[in-house]
Image (cartoon, rainbow, N blue to C red):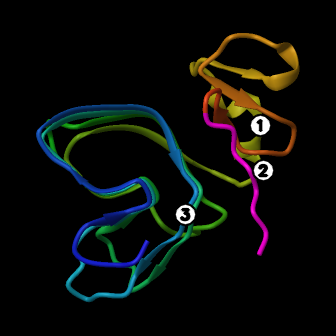
Amino acid sequence: MIGGFDKGGFAGAFTGDNTVTDSYCNGDVNMVNLNMIYVGGFAGDIGGNTTVYNVYATGRLTGNITELSGGIAGKIVKEVSVLKSFWNQSANPGISGIGTNSGIADIQGKTEEELKKIDTFGGWDISHVSEGRDTIWLIEEGKYPYLRENRMVEINN
């Protein structure tokens, strides 16, 4: 994703009353504009009365990365909770999960290898595809988890 002010792989910003659950993003976020304020692997700025849980971000943050950048979010405010969520620490070494944090955060940086293991996602409604269980998330050996209704397909150009 390339562009304007607050930027994230899933959304630039959340404001108002929101609940974001069982979501992921795999795209890189490139901070090319010096006017950008908050940059995150999942969302740039999470504000309002927002709760985010069971999300992960695997993309790289590139460009003019500052202390206002984070693997999950560039900023969260005190009314915000980000729970049971992960970012790819292998793609973003040295970057914290949240750049500016005054909310509640239960997030962890994981290696790319860890993000492809079911054990990482304890507490999520997830199963291995070979189990045939009716869960929200599925995972296959050596691949990132995906939503049952949104099977990830790799495209090589």
Residue 119 location (% of width, % of height): 73, 28
Determine whether 9 is above or below 129 in the image: below
The answer to which image quadrant residue 118 occupies is: top right
**Amino acid under disc 3:** Gly
Mark 3 packing: few (<14 Cα in 10 Å), some, or many (20+)? Answer: some
- Quarter the C terminus occupies: bottom right
Determine whether 55 is above or below 38 in the image: above
Determine whether 7 is above or below 116 in the image: below
Q: Which residue is mark 1?
A: 117
**Amino acid under disc 1:** Lys
Is there any visible trace of residue 102 in the rendered image? yes
Q: Is residue 140 left or right of residue 56?
A: right
Residue 27's label in the rendered image is 3
**Amino acid under disc 2:** Glu
Do tag 2 and tag 1 residues touch (Cβ < 8 Å)? yes
Q: Which residue is mark 2?
A: 113
- Quarter the N terminus occupies: bottom left
Numbered disc in front, either 1 or 3: 3
Q: Which residue corresponds to the image point at 61% horizontal and 29% vertical from the top-left?
A: 149
Q: Is residue 22 magenta?
A: no
Numbered disc in front, either 2 or 3: 3
Residue 52 location (% of width, % of height): 35, 35
The answer to which image quadrant residue 100 occupies is: bottom left
Magenta-colored segment: predominant secondary structure: loop
Task: Using the image as rendered, state which of residue 148 and residue 65 is in the foreground.
Answer: 148
What residue span does the magenta drawing correspond to?
Answer: 150-157
Q: Which residue corresponds to the image point at 32% horizontal and 72% vertical from the top-left?
A: 67
